Amino acid sequence: TQLLEQSPQFLSIQEGENLTVYCNSSSVFSSLQWYRQEPGEGPVLLVTVVTGGEVKKLKRLTFQFGDARKDSSLHITAAQPGDTGLYLCAGAPNTNAGKSTFGDGTTLTVKP
Amino acid sequence: DAGVIQSPRHEVTEMGQEVTLRCKPISGHNSLFWYRQTMMRGLELLIYFNNNVPIDDSGMPEDRFSAKMPNASFSTLKIQPSEPRDSAVYFCASSLRVRYNEQFFGPGTRLTVL
């Protein structure tokens, strides 16, 4: 069973601060997704990374896939209250995998 | 294009009653997933279908749970009989399998079993 560990589990910061959350595994993934879930809603796909070392940017969010494709990080610059939510990473073991492994998530609270 | 549609959004029932949750995936997607989310256990995969065929139901808790996908645009998750420990948010998600298993989630059904 492939496991994804996310850290920290909870993070509370002030508006304007920077933060990084991590997603780690001992297994190799062919692709990894990051999702954000707001209260009362389903997870929403933010990004997919597929190449070792790949970096993708989405406005103030920067996603990186580890060189060995076993880990990933999400960095948020100048966090805003609208960034509040549960951030989930999910990995697929191969391109045509039927299912992904989800981490337990990082709950981020950005205070105004 | 409409996203994944789930109904009902909220369900309150009494222990022992049958509960049926419904899902309409995104048109053209060929994989469908049912998840359960709780504070204690996080997001758990219950079952998934490829091209309407159940592929992996190892996450289904027990025989009280069953899922069907009679066609490409509709799936149900049934719990019979329901128990208080089934209380959770149930999500349906769909994906286009060739796209790295990127999943698109519905808004969820919040189930409360009294």
Image (tube, coloured by chain):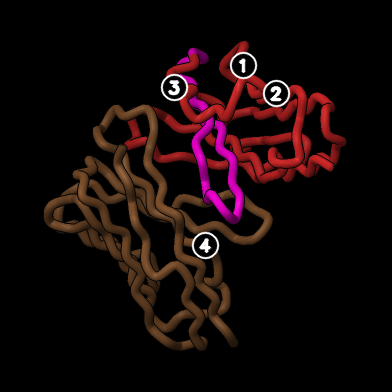
Chain colours: A brown, B red
Provide the residue designation for mark 2: B78
Query: Which image quarter holds the C terminus of chain B?
Result: top right
Mark number for residue B37?
Answer: none
Taking the image as shown, residue A101 lies to the left or right of residue B49, namely left
The amino acid marked with disc number 2 is Lys
User: Which image quarter: residue A31?
Assistant: top left
Question: What element does badge 1 sit on?
Answer: strand
Q: Is residue B110 above or below residue A66?
A: above
Q: Which mark is residue A86?
A: 4
Q: Residue at x 56, y 32 (%)?
A: B34
Do the residues at discs 3 and 2 belong to one chain? yes
Q: SS for tag 2?
A: strand
* Chain for numbered disc 3: B
**Disc 3 element:** strand
Can the viewer see residue B30 in this picture?
Answer: no
Residue A103: image location, x then y, percent: 40, 52
